[in-house]
Amino acid sequence: WSLMVEAGFVVEFGAWKSTGHHDIFALSPCRRKSKGKDLKTGNKPAEPAMFNEQALTYLVQAASDFPELEEAEFEICQPRASEDDGFERVSRKLSSQDCRVC
């Protein structure tokens, strides 16, 4: 696996352009699998990856940059979130099978 930190991505669809970066992005040697993570350090919890537009956008960006991807997943990690208040510190993974982007 190769590991990229603060890996930037750009996806363009006609006039629409999406830019962003995975805090951590890993790509398998065969380039068919990827794993991404975004670290949230603020005090306001983010939506879990399964429902998070940023997470979905990052999966689309990975699929666009690596068309050979067959399986991709993304997690949001937020160490300050309170699980006692119902917020996950590490969200359930959003996978390409959940959203069919790959």
Image (cartoon, helix red, strand yellow):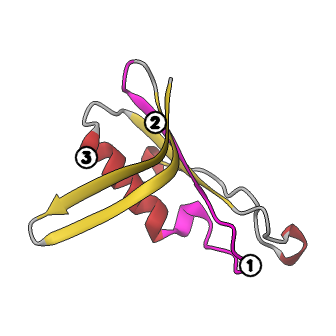
Q: Tell me if residue 62 comes above or below residue 28 in the rendering.
A: below
Residue 58, position as x, y percentages in the image: 41, 56
Q: Residue furthest right?
A: 84
Horizontal side of residue 31 vs 78, given as left or right? left
Locate residue 97: give its quadrant. Answer: top left
Q: Which mark is residue 43?
A: 1
Q: Under tag 2, what secondary structure?
A: strand
Taking depth in this image into account, of 37 and 68 the one nearest to the observer is 37
- Relative to residue 59, is residue 25 drawn left or right? right
What amino acid type is highlighted by mark number 3? Ser
Amino acid found under the numbered disc labelled 2 = Ser
Q: Earlier in the sequence, mark 3 or mark 2?
A: 2
Q: Nearer the viewer, mark 1 or mark 2?
A: 1
Marks 1 and 2, how far apart at CA = 28 Å
**Which element carries disc 1, helix, strand or loop?**
loop
Check disc 3 and report its element: helix, strand or loop.
Answer: helix
In the image, residue 48 lies in the stretch drawn in magenta:
yes
Residue range of the region highlighted in magenta in the rendering = 30-52
How packed mark 3 is, by other alpha carbons closer than 10 Å (few <14, some 14-19, many 20 or more), is: some
Instruction: Please state which amino acid type lies under the numbered disc 1.
Output: Asn
> Going 60% across and 50% down the picture, which residue do you hit?
93
Tell which of 56 and 43 is nearer to you: 43
Relative height, residue 98 to residue 86 (above, below) = above
Q: Is residue 71 visible?
A: yes
Is residue 26 magenta-colored? no
Residue 55 placement (x, y as % from top left): 48, 60
Q: Which mark is residue 34?
A: 2
Q: Earlier in the sequence, mark 1 or mark 3?
A: 1
Residue where numbered disc 3 is placed: 64
Q: CA distance from mark 3 to mark 2?
A: 12 Å
